[in-house]
Image (cartoon, rainbow, N blue to C red):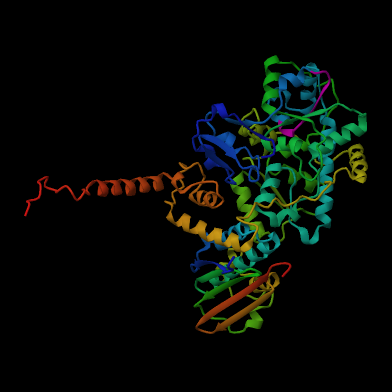
């Protein structure tokens, strides 16, 4: 858990919906309250979707407080620009935001996304053995790889998220010193701000959800003309739908790019499994998104993902950058601001013990405990599966009687014992109740 | 602690393509629980996967066993299949006796045995035509 998810304990009923929805089995319900294991959570937001009580939400900063400040600068995720028909172009959105006194840095974002695609094409071209490369764009996928697929960490593109790079380009171009707020479609993107990977500190300061800002805009119903700001390219908006990033990279690639794009966690995990087994020879680039259809399916969005998809399908896109844009991209490229500062590290889960012999003994114990459990993964014990309960028990974080079936077995055994005991009589009493005949 | 090795075993069904890579995935989970370094886990997963595929495609099913000791692990695949008449030929990259059906599924590229050899520190094949094949691959832990 890296700051993308917030649990509101007062609302939690202690049901098992979120436990079962978590793809990395990071959730437990202990003593009626959700506990998230930080080492396992990838901030994908599946638990948010599954919670009927709204006890789990996207962890965002206070929008009302932020917008009351002067000169708020917004760095909006491309998803933000395909939420409502009226503002479905960056220049229209910019105008609507300016009406509220908010500054949007979309024109720098468009350069940053071009730069990321251009840099990625270069890395892939030189890649050789390291192909297929994996996209760095979805933070949930990166965390999933760090935790569950550590063998693939070396394949992650060393290209910084364009959401970060955009702020750098804006600061360099305008000298702007203001703190920047990310408008994020999901909890995973919130982690860019709160707990960045591959860099020491984020260039972004605050985070709010796409949903919050859009609702606010709609409530005011600002009419826009689209004439107040200059046109901004739209290639980068396609990054919010599965396959858009690959398309953008291939437009900068001098030879054909073989890429595979999948969305949704189930598909992502299947693909990473197959990739780990070396089944993607001949593929150059792999684009995974944790949410269905891509970022437009994020839990912090406002619009139906299907309508967003429709909007993106009908967007007119000029894939070739203009001469001026290309010069700008090359200048930024030469500065190297697109590169991740540090290589992405593996996040190994704690083994059962640091000592191999002891870990083996615990694993045997775990196998034995698991063999005695009912194997129906009902979730009543507050764990996602019987296997997870067995693991918690050997790690000292659970008891066999947490399992309702085991508890019943114990009660049955105990009641049998009580019955047997109650039928025993002291020797001074005869079972018939008569006194013995004296001799 | 007494260092009795940890043993895990799986049965491989002939032609059961629905469970591809299952044993390999389970072995990987076990090795992570034991805190084995990720590079070793990666190699073991490839070895297990290729050995599992070989037993499934050529050996008519069999047994896959992983033994984890204090300084190394060993993966053994045993089948009662037709055996390998010419081991040196089978070890050549790109050589395969897989049927067209198998190739259509994207397997049988003739890279299985070379991959096992590349990802293990020691590999041994005992085979007898008409009786079966036993493959063992050993991976040493770093610093041993």
Q: Is residue A399 magenta?
A: no
Residue at 93%, 40% (x, y): give it: A327
Q: Position of residue B46 (x, y in %)?
A: 64, 65
Q: Residue B41: x and y, percent?
A: 66, 62
**In this image, A212 relative to A24: left or right?**
right
Residues drawn in magenta? A69-79
Asked where in the image residue A325 lies, by quadrant, the reply is: top right
Q: Is residue A43 above or below residue A217?
A: below
In x, y percent, where is residue A54? 56, 28
Which quadrant, please, contains the C terminus of chain A?
bottom left
Judging depth in this view, the residue of A292 and A372 nearest the camera is: A372
Q: Evaluate whether residue B78 shows in this view.
A: yes
Q: Position of residue B21 (x, y in %)?
A: 57, 61
Where is A358 relative to A146, above or below?
A: below
| Location of residue A47 by image quarter | top right
Residue that appears at 68% across and 35% down: A4
Instruction: Please check the rendered image and state whether residue A74 is part of the magenta-colored stretch, yes or no.
Output: yes
Q: Give the answer, above or below, for where A350 lies relative to B108.
A: above
Q: Is residue A11 left or right of residue A106?
A: left
Q: Is residue B107 something one can see in this rendering?
A: no
Q: Quadrant of the N terminus of chain A?
A: top right
- Point 75% across, 38% down: residue: A192
Q: Which of A223 and B24 lies nearest the eye of the viewer?
A: B24
- Residue drawn 52% across the image and 45% down it: A384
């Amino acid at each position: 858990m890296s700051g993308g998810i917030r649990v509101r304990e007062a609302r939690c009923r202690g049901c098992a919906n979120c436990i079962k929805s978590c793809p990395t089995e990071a959730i437990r319900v202990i003593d009626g309250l959700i506990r998230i294991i930080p080492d396992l959570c990838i901030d994908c937001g599946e638990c948010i979707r599954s919670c009927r009580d709204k006890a789990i939400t996207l962890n965002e900063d206070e929008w009302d407080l932020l917008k009351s400040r002067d000169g708020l600068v917004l760095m909006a995720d491309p998803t933000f620009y395909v939420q409502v028909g009226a503002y479905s172009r960056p220049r229209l959105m910019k105008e609507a935001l300016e009406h509220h006194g908010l500054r949007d840095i979309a024109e720098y974002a468009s350069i940053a996304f071009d730069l990321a695609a251009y840099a990625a094409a270069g890395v892939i071209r030189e890649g050789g053995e390291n192909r297929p490369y994996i996209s760095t764009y979805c933070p949930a996928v990166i965390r999933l790889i760090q935790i569950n697929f550590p063998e693939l960490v070396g394949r992650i593109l060393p290209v910084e998220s364009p959401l970060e790079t955009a702020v750098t380009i804006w600061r360099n171009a305008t000298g702007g010193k203001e703190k920047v707020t990310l408008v994020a479609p999901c909890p995973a993107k919130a982690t860019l701000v709160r707990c960045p990977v591959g860099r020491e500190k984020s260039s972004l300061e605050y985070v709010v959800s796409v949903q919050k800002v859009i609702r606010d805009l709609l409530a005011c119903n600002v009419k826009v003309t689209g004439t107040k700001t200059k046109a901004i390219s739209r290639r980068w908006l396609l990054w919010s739908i599965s396959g858009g990033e690959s398309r953008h990279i291939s437009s900068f690639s001098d030879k054909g790019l073989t890429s595979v794009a999948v969305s949704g966690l189930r598909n992502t995990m299947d693909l990473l499994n197959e990739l780990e087994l070396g089944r993607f020879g001949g593929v150059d680039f792999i684009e995974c998104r944790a949410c269905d259809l891509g970022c437009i399916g994020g839990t912090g969005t406002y619009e139906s993902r299907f309508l967003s998809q429709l909007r993106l399908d009908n967007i007119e896109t000029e894939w070739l950058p203009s001469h001026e844009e290309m010069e700008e991209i090359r200048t930024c490229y030469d500065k190297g601001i697109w590169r991740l500062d540090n290589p992405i590290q593996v996040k190994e889960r704690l083994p059962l013990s640091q000592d191999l012999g002891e870990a083996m003994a615990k694993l045997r114990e775990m196998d034995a405990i698991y063999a005695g459990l009912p194997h129906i993964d009902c979730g009543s014990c507050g764990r996602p599966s019987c296997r997870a309960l067995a693991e918690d028990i050997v790690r000292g974080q659970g008891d066999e009687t947490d399992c309702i079936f085991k508890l019943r077995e114990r009660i049955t055994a105990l009641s049998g014992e009580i019955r047997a005991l109650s039928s025993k009589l002291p020797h001074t009493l005869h079972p018939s109740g008569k006194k013995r005949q004296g001799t | 602690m007494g260092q009795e090795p940890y043993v895990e075993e799986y049965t491989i069904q002939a032609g059961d393509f629905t469970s591809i890579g299952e044993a390999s995935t389970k072995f990987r989970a076990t090795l992570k629980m034991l805190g084995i370094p990720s590079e070793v886990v990666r190699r073991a997963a490839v070895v297990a996967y290729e050995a599992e595929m070989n037993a499934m495609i050529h050996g008519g099913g069999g047994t896959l066993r992983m033994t984890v000791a204090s300084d190394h692990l060993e993966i053994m695949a045993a089948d009662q299949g037709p055996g390998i008449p010419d081991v040196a030929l089978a070890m050549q990259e790109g050589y395969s006796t897989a049927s067209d059906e198998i190739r259509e599924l994207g397997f049988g590229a003739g890279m299985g045995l070379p991959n096992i050899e590349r990802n293990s520190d020691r590999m041994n094949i005992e085979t007898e035509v008409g009786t079966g094949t036993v493959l063992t691959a050993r991976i040493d832990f770093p610093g041993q």
